[in-house]
Amino acid sequence: MDTKITLFLAILKKLCKCVYLPPMSIMTLKIEFLKGVGTAKADLLAKELNIRSVEDLLNHFPFRYIDKTKFQKISELTGDEDYVQIKGQVVQLQTLGAGRSKRLVAQFTDSSGQIELIWFQGIKWIEDSLQLRTEYIVFGRLTEFNRKFSIAHPEMELMVGHPAVSFLAPVYPSTDKLNKKGLDTKSQRRIFRQLTEKLLPADLPEILPLYIVEKLKLLSRFQAYQFIHFPPDSAHLHAAQKRLKFEELLCMQLKILQYKNRKQSLIKGYIFEKVGDLFNGFYSKYLPFELTNAQKKVIREIRKDMGSGKQMNRLLQGDVGSGKTIVALLSMLIALDNGFQACLMAPTEILAQQHFQSIEEFIKPLNIGIGYLSGSVKGKTRNQVLTALKDGSIKIIIGTHALLEDWVEFQKIGLAIIDEQHRFGVKQRAALWSKSTVPPHILVMTATPIPRTLAMTLYGDLDVSVIDELPPGRKEIKTLHFNENKRLRLLGFIREEINKGRQIYIVYPLIEESEKLDLLDLENGYQALLREFPMPEYHISVVHGKMKPEDKEYEMSRFIKKQTQIMVATTVIEVGVNVPNASVMIIEHAERFGLSQLHQLRGRVGRGADQSYCILMTSFKLSKDSRERIKTMCETNNGFVIAEADLRLRGPGDIEGTRQSGLFGLNIADLAKDAAILTTAREIALRILDSDPEMNEPQHTAIKRHIDHRYRNLQDWSSIS
Ligand code: ADP
Ligand code: MG
């Protein structure tokens, strides 16, 4: 639009508002009318950053702050820093290479030394705008190449001419396009400056109940927004961050818990009131061991749920080997005691088979109809199982997701247990519902501990039980870190263990991007082992993702039956396989695995009475993160500690199955770092909803309105749980 017309319209609009409305709040101003913005830039802000209103703009928080008093010296850099901030000058600038490898290289010095700054994109623009021999602040990720440090695409800012807006200068997220169109950090700062100056307390009224603000000694909403953009010092910055994080997490928890409460009051569940002969008989006569306290506690929680009249939706977390199977069985017996059927589902055929075998063994003396169903059960057997399920002669059915197929009909399904939850899709869980008019109770079991903060978020509407104790008498798995120069020792060790009658896993990484190389690597490793451990004395299984399912099953079953002593595999063995006689887990290129994956793999051993070992083979040179992962593995066997470390190292977005957390659009809170604030927010949310379930009290109406507004586009998040 022509600027004159825009201006005219703006004036007209302002005039109208002056006449008809009370003094206009800056919150209702279109951002194009802010000084330094205009229509073109407003369009760009909308396109690039999805900023369309003053409110959006205010919520566009700095992602870091430049503290102009703290710099590292180039000579003191070690290469261990993730990010560095240095101060100095560009003394030389040249373009190197051509075509795709073309790059701009600047020699940057401070009084102590020199490093290179490198750009691969936007070369022309940077070349034109960089000033030689002028003091800059440079910030970026340090990389080391050929013993030389460099920073690719650093953030740069002139020392002089920098408006002394505050001690901590905000740096805003931006994009190449914004930078080029004059919306770099500095001009963004100018826009925010005038915006916050015009802001009045009435523009950002308090939404939290006063008693909470006072109790937690929080800044007011207005103050928090002022200080998050322009903190006078770090104490004010922290106070602002705390207030805004708390507000964000409280709103999220209120939303989740309200959903959970509504779901629970709407959906009726079967009432299993009695614990009958099957449960009691099994418990007193046939249970082969004493339950751990943690197992007892969890069974009590499950019993209470199933007797409550509401549908159970419980997540059972327990580290590998903590004894979830027996908990599953006892829960199923309660369902049977109340005249219902129960099912247990596993993500793979092998796991389902193992469950079937161990549960069949457990309940042999009870004389209960038990069945198995998977895609590979065919023909007459299949028909028999289906009929028996429908007429109720099968009480316990164990299988794969084949149980969810349309033609599988139950007589009366009361409890569905799903093992290894992260392999089971949301849709599949939902399919269980259609099997019955009243939905069965649902117990989801997972051996991948989920950090507390994520559990409160992603599974915030599920109840969580934790088995935090291993059965007695387990020997701690010894974890060792080896380099290539210990290969000979490793082979000797394998031989010793095999001579003792044990079995060995050797796992190789396999990722899509380097699939060919990875397979070659595994193949070479396998050939080398064949030479070291020749037939007929030794037998080696090999399993990888590129094999046909039948072949995989065959090789696995040879290992399970002890016909082979070594299993060379890619991560297909990751989940659940139980071979108690296997006592050594060797992980090749361990630096390439994520923490939770390493922990899962390690959980394949240590299942019997023997001392077990996990050996992490890595190359000599490791990145900082890899070193941290290996160190964590060697230090602890505790899955929860590992899950927390994983979250810290990777960030919540990267953890399997947690991408949904983006649904809540967390703007400032960080699930990896803000566990304490989240815990407080959850407690307070619980208390609010306890006393005022629909948030209709006057002190809660403001936050209720805010939540409705904030999550107005969030329709489908309930499907994640
Ligand atoms: P997971 O939680 O990994 O599924 P399992 O249920 O497979 O663990 O249990 C691992 C092993 O520990 C099994 O052999 C099981 O029989 C045994 N076990 C379970 N609970 C106890 C207990 N309370 N005391 C002794 N052994 C137990
Ligand atoms: Mg298990």
Image (tube, rainbow, N blue to C red):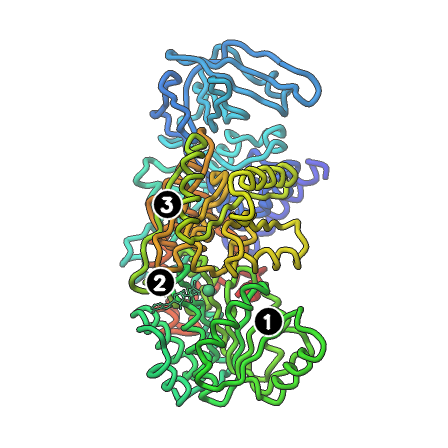
Q: Is mark 1 within 8 Å of ligand 2?
A: no
Of helix, strand and loop, which one carries label 3? Answer: strand
What percent of the width, then of the height, locates residue 80? 40, 28
How crowded pointer 2 is (Cα within 10 Å; few <14, some 14-19, many 20+) is rated as: some
Q: Which residue reaches farthest front? A: 536
Disc marking residue 430:
1
On the image, the x and y values in percent for residue 213 come to: 32, 57
1 or 2: mark nearer the eye: 1
Give the residue type at disc 1. Answer: Ala
Q: Amino acid at mark 3?
A: Thr
- Give the percent coordinates (x, y) of residue 145: 51, 21
Q: Secondary structure at mark 1?
A: helix
Choose between 395 and 421: the one closer to the eye. 395
Mark with earlier residue (3, 1): 1
| Residue denoted by label 3 | 479
Inspect this view and state whether residue 376 appears: yes
- Residue annotated with mark 2: 209
